[in-house]
Amino acid sequence: MPATIVDQDNDVVGPYNRLSASQVNSFQSCPRLWFYEKNLHFKFPQVPVLFVGRAVEDAFCRMLRESPGLISSNASHDTISRIPLDDNGQPDRNSDEVWPSQRILPLPDKLLPKSISEIRDWAISRIDAHLPVSLEEMRVEWNKDERKAGDWSDVDPNYCREMCINGIDMHLKELESCMENIDENTLKFWRNGHREEWPSPDGFGFSLEGTHPLANNSKITLLEAWEISRPWFVDPDAANFSLNAIHPDFWFQGEYDLVYRWNGKIKIVDLKASLGKGDRSGDYVKQLRMYAMLWWVTHEKKELVSDLEVWYLGANKVKIIDNPTESELEEMEKELNLLWKELKSVDISIENFPPSPSPVRGFLEGGVKTDPPSEKRCDRCDWSKICPGGSGNDEFPADKSFTLPGNITPIEVTPINDLDPRLTIVCDVFSVFDSKNKRPSITISQGKSMAKIDILVDKHQDGQRPWPEQISKGDRIMIENAVVTVNWKGELVLKIDPLGMISKTQKEIVEHSDLMEFRARWNVVGKMIYKFDKKGVGRNGKQWHRKGIMIMDPSGSMKISGWANDWGTQYEMSQMGDLVLIANTGIDAWATQVRGDISRNSKIQIISSTR
């Protein structure tokens, strides 16, 4: 089973609290780096190469999902897209819909590839159909990112195409091996239409009626070998993070790139759209070894991974990773569980995560180990200006009030961790517009006070739908952990995010909070970590522009954003490491992250500068 269907009733950890290979690698590189990026949610600059890698993998997997026996080389890129998905965003096991490949008849014999070379040409043609679409989708996503950096014009589509072709050649070696080594039972199993519990994505559903439409009745054909050797991968149409493999005790998760299994052995492949040079290549080795542990524990510790490989598509080289022994897997599981308990299952503070960087590792193209470079890890760190390991420090003023220039009255500030944007209330439904299978539009009343409900998610963090199946005007409801905000019209809005829930109740209104008890405006002070900027065009055709900052204080961190015109000159003057005060900011939240929202009545002031 390369993916896990989570038992929501027994998942005591939840999706936001699991450990992952990337977190382990981050912590082992430097505990303070982990704290900044995983606990305080600092986001490093998003350069195009990060999105290019995703585009290459997306195009490659969309090509793998297709069949040269069903899809012509010049077919549209979306011929077998839009598979049925369940409420979790996974391919739907119980759908009555027709799957896209079921609607397609096999190609006539004259259009079928007859050799490995012709299959390669077909696959390249399919990459040419998919890659431009994947790159454009990633360009749009990069352009929307508030931390975007670099220039998309530096992206070379021809190099991206070359990396995809390198991946094709690596996959075709599996196909050739399948042609030569397939056993009769496996071939018969496939021809009779039998499917794995998690089939390799091919546009068909979880079961087939009768034989496979491309089945032959003699020696294995190239088309059959293409189908049988196809690895499992995350279906490109599935929701993000919906196909993770998750430890039986829920504390560790990972997402495999490719899982080859046609010969009864398990090979896990990590796709990398890179040359494999530099320090990160060491992380890929550790990641794959952790994935070997994950496969083992999710198969009752009875099935070991046979092969681990990194495919460096930029260098056109395959790196083979040594498999952990069973005793090493046992030890790895214990060590990772202890690390999870240290990082996730207890309250943590910055003092427990000192800057303690590991040495930078050296690797040549293809992930070949070499002498380490002379540079230190802190030299390349995005956070060195605010970290004691670089030129920064952990010092913050003890003052809880500040007097700004031109003001007489001191401004009292609140620690970030004490900001409370959530409210639990009992109220009545004043009006409801309920559309089938869509989030209802609800207005609630509590005495003479009114508020709108903005449901932002279809699922609570525990997997339940966050509103009652039947809800009507006059119903008494409890709204738990709603985020209280005020919209541009001055109306109260209660937002339901992954932590919020609406349920029917018989409780009296006086038993819970008053709708008007919440505090709308706050003052905070913290170190400026970075600025961010977002622009776009609204539905009315008008351009919009928002700016923001990430700040931290001894208790936590928060993003604060607002319309560009509301920030003033102090925003432009501030730089990384400056101590800034933001007065009269509204607060918002998403899951565990508190956010600020300034208006024209807010103010930013530099208290002390790093200059």
Image: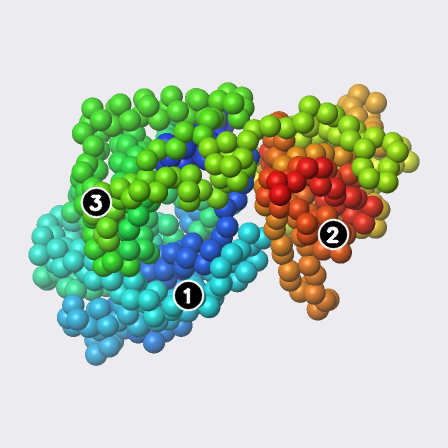
Question: How many residues crowd around disc 2 within 10 Å: few (fewer than 14), some, or many (20 or more)?
Answer: few
On residue 370, which mark appears? 3
On residue 291, which mark appears? none
Residue 580 can be seen in this image = yes
Among numbered discs 3 and 1, the one appearing first in the sequence? 1
Residue 288 can be seen in this image = no
- Of residues 369 and 71, the one drawn nearer to the viewer in this rendering: 369
Residue position marked by numbered label 1 in the rendering: 155
Q: Amino acid at mark 2?
A: Thr
Determine the residue positioned at 37% across, 39% down.
376
Among numbered discs 3 and 2, the one appearing first in the sequence? 3
Residue that sits furthest to the front in the current view: 611
The vertical placement of 196 against 358, above or below, is: below
* The N terminus: image quadrant: top left
* The C terminus: image quadrant: top right
Residue position marked by numbered label 2 in the rendering: 569
Q: Amino acid at mark 3?
A: Thr
